[in-house]
Amino acid sequence: MDSTATESTETNSTGTTGSLTRLLDGRWAEVRDRARGFELRHFDPPSYELGTEEHRARVLDRLREFAASGLPQVGFDPAYGGTGDVGGGMVAMEMLGFRDLSLMVKSGVQWGLFAGAIAALGTERHRQAYLRDAIDLDLLGCFAMTESGHGSDVQSLETTATYRPETEEFEIHSPTASARKEYIGNAARDGRVAVVFAQLITGAESHGVHALLVPIRDELGQPLPGVTIGDCGRKAGLNGVDNGRISFDRVRVPRDALLDRYGQVAADGTYTSSIKSSGRRFFTMIGTLVRGRVSVAGAAQNAAKLALTIAGRHGLARRQFPRPGREEEEVVLLDYRAHQRRLLPALARTYALSLAQNALLEDLHEHLTAPAADPADQDQRQRELESRAAGLKAASTWHATRTIQVCREACGGAGYLAENVLPQLRADIDVFATFEGDNTVLLQLVGKGLLTDYSTQFEDLDIRGVARFVADQFVGFATERTVNRGVLERLRRRRGEQPEIRDRAWQLAQLEDREKHLIETAALRLRGRMAGDADPFDAFNAVQPHLLTAASAHVERQVTEAFLAGIDTCPEQADLLDLLCDLHVLSGMEADRAWYLEHNRISDRRAKEIVKAVDDLCEQLRPHVPELLAGFGIPDPWITAPIAQ
Amino acid sequence: MDSTATESTETNSTGTTGSLTRLLDGRWAEVRDRARGFELRHFDPPSYELGTEEHRARVLDRLREFAASGLPQVGFDPAYGGTGDVGGGMVAMEMLGFRDLSLMVKSGVQWGLFAGAIAALGTERHRQAYLRDAIDLDLLGCFAMTESGHGSDVQSLETTATYRPETEEFEIHSPTASARKEYIGNAARDGRVAVVFAQLITGAESHGVHALLVPIRDELGQPLPGVTIGDCGRKAGLNGVDNGRISFDRVRVPRDALLDRYGQVAADGTYTSSIKSSGRRFFTMIGTLVRGRVSVAGAAQNAAKLALTIAGRHGLARRQFPRPGREEEEVVLLDYRAHQRRLLPALARTYALSLAQNALLEDLHEHLTAPAADPADQDQRQRELESRAAGLKAASTWHATRTIQVCREACGGAGYLAENVLPQLRADIDVFATFEGDNTVLLQLVGKGLLTDYSTQFEDLDIRGVARFVADQFVGFATERTVNRGVLERLRRRRGEQPEIRDRAWQLAQLEDREKHLIETAALRLRGRMAGDADPFDAFNAVQPHLLTAASAHVERQVTEAFLAGIDTCPEQADLLDLLCDLHVLSGMEADRAWYLEHNRISDRRAKEIVKAVDDLCEQLRPHVPELLAGFGIPDPWITAPIAQ
């Protein structure tokens, strides 16, 4: 294939390009458009030339600009200056993934975690006292959960909040070095108050982890007595965020510092809660913070879109090596098969994940704004949405890290220069796989949900509990299709006759079958090991990689279904999206084809057919790269890399 | 498996740990020990807190310290202050991979490329005039090959060196913007002279790319008239190296500025060369610089060793989540199967690549210090060694990038903090896949060599030439085993009966068969396409991913053979190394098992057996992690990460 014609990837708000953008913009197109109008100032010198302190100062300035735009307020209750648009609030955060990931993360800390915790875990009293200040940046705060000794295992936090009835105060204390709060955003420089997660102790009894509002700095920015604040210093990326360490030496806070929506302490120290199980109570609290995880996934997808736009434009413009047979002409990079194979499957997957993200945003918005009548239904739905958010966060952040890396490599030496943006994106995105839930731990959560069918006991189940549950109750797994029969029928009718591997019903059946088989065999293996006299840890450990694969298969199936549902809503571009979806599904099957082969799902001949189809799809999609990139709807001035001009 | 006992990974120069280090140190153990005694100064503040200019200044200071150590001189001729130890010279550079990759790269530019080009491409006159100054850092220089428009395709460089007989001068000129020299190390700040690669023109005739010594800065560091120097500015990593841009506006240099070992210009402009073909002449010149590529591979391996040591020690010390059934105890990270699977195959592969690197060093040393009597044999050997160096550079740098990334993720948030070293390693290593030959282009070179059996025409062959050669002459491919039958027999006898997948002969046969099949089918596909009326580019392009896979298979087989040969020389630790080699081979087969399955090389049952064997090997090797890490022989003071203490 040859492409000597001038190709443009500029955003085009009319015609077919516009319809791809409309599809990806989805229900909150208006918020996205507002975000497209939000101008960031302070570009000189560029952030990558700033020292840590200057960079932090710049990002704080930008945080204030963002607050002034009104965008971060969108998701909050109108009583505190918001518009109550839950989905829109997440979208506003996502859009920062196109601009400045330090700003995105600092915004996530301030509005998503700090203000979000006050709104979700506090009661009216806390919201009245703090929420508007937090939202308007008159009160900068931290979300002090992670400790040196405990990151993923939050239930084992060591910090204590011991109630002292004599003064009606809590005493916040870090009993060991490993109890020190670690990697806390806003702690090293700007935070005045922290939402501190600690084991709540009244009398001699511990009630598990609860959150309390603890002032950490005075008006002059000095640490308060008993509070020791450290600086995490330079990081691989996100150096505009001031991550720090906090420890407490018997710091006293008043009784109403407890964010007590889910657990209350009376003046005499009596503890009450509507949720009896401390494990379940804890996960209910954590569950209210799911929005932050969703925004992180969307921002990561947007960072991948920006990287693909830079590498894609470079690949369309850059030529290397004379074309054999026509020596006077050099070959455009994106005409090399190996180059197509690097970028095009990543492009297809980015569309897939975006559409899955949009579906999750809509469902979460409905769940939070229009709860089910039956609380049990609402609980079940909450667990399912948490699981989807966990899976999509893991898939999206890993995808973003891989894609940005591929993009930087696809730009050769130019991709290594800071001016071409990819180095900053790559360095910033790296920790997205670790924070807001380590991806491996999140996939394990998805796996547990699948094994236990989101049963009501779910939140209480530790590894041993899951193993026992499976041993006692697991009878089989039924894949629940999220894409309806009507959609599939319409897609099929429109496409007409196709070779089997490009038949949607065949593709979906493969994905469903893989998911079901992996989950059922994981359960059987776990049950088999538990039936013997195995140590529950050994049993679970042996099955762990299998369970993670099962969880990934589940996420992949959901993502593909969202892609199909998305195509159904965009008839103007259905042919192009169909090709793109084929590339997404078949490049995924190609990567996993060892599994399909060794489980006799496909023949060796079929496997080679899939590899060939991926090659062909790359070739077919090659001429559409400009419009697919334009579909991301990134305003041109945001694409600053010289190689992308 | 449980590990509550205190585990130490400290270097231990006696006993079994010592024998692993001796194995990895190999023939140049003495140079490695000298390098272990080389102290770097200037650690405060740490490099990651320095601005670009301060960082560059520090690395220049360190470069001078390194020069004072006598280590970089080792590989040069005794006439210019060296000891003529070619292999030792490469080893000295490799060792910097444990310390400071900016220093490694700046050293590579100065001694490997700049001084190396004077030594290899110049004649006695050039060596007399410049070499000692270059080696002793009295003359800092650049290697100005890459241009904005041409990186991988060096034969198409646009810079010209036009001979002017009237003044017996060359005129160095950048005719277009894309002719600007780009990413040139030492250019932005320190270089006084550049070895400039340019199209040599005498009369009206072009003789292809040649190298000339061109002064670029005066004594005060100002660019000379006609020379425009730019700064590449901040990069993703390696910010201690001053990469810059150089363009020339009709700059005159005297006739003897031409490094004329392979092509001479007489006073009247008559061009002479003992190599008639300009393509072959060019590749001969480039081939003399192979040592730089070898050092880059070794340095990348060493960076991976440091990362594994940091993540390994952290994984041995860090605990997370209570152990089911024994709640008071938390589980050591490295006891999680998923964690083992992240780190242990990478550890095994690092040993494999190190032993392949040592074998290459020895063979290259012999080749360069004791040439074959027959020049044709020497030429053939040169091409084979260039191909091995290319393949091992690609494999090692990709491995290092992936491994450092895995290590950073395996350390969670701690791995993202600059103080824990992994961020710097990760950012610095990233471009190793791109410079000293882009890895994809290098693998393509390996693939071409396999298709053409390193025939004498090889260097002349462009894509079309290779396609024609294959169409006309390719008859089949015979894998040439580099490990001898005696080694295999001894390994086999010692190990006794093994399940088939752990039988060395079976493993090697699989690797050989895969390589042979991939190469032969690539040739057949190419021939098939050329037989039709295909555009040669389209033909080659369609086969490109296949050919890259064939080249990788070839490299993998060579690396595994080197591992086996290494085990044979280390009877004290043969049992442990055997397990490690099994993990290396079987985790590689596991990753490629789709190929083995779809080509009916293994059954689905066998594929599952391989997956299970990798699990089992991780478990068996888990207790040996401390001694395997100690085997890398990294002095404790060099492991500065707080999480690795």
Image (cartoon, coloured by chain):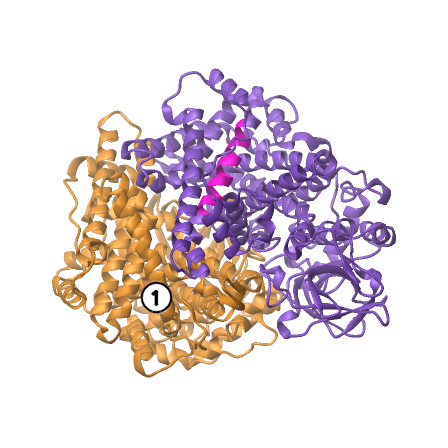
Chain colours: A purple, B orange
Residue A205 located left or right of residue A305: right
Where's residue A251, x and y in %?
78, 72
User: Is residue B105 among the parts visible in the rendering?
Assistant: no
Residue sitting at the far bottom: B14
Q: Is residue A247 above or below residue B151?
A: below
**Magenta part mainly helix, strand or loop?**
helix
Q: Residue at x 63, y 26 (%)?
A: A18
Element class at badge 1? helix
Residue B442 located left or right of residue B434: left
What subunit carries mark 1?
Answer: B
Q: Identify the residue position indicated by label 1 in the image.
A: B621
Residue closest to the eye, A639 or A257:
A257
Residue B450 located left or right of residue A458: left
Residue closest to the eye, A370 or A63:
A370
Classify the position of the N terminus of chain A by image quarter: top left
| Range drawn in magenta | A548-564
On whether residue A309 falls in the magenta region, the answer is: no
Q: Residue at x 85, y 43 (%)?
A: A81
Residue closest to the eye, A633 or A199:
A199
Quadrant position of residue B15: bottom left
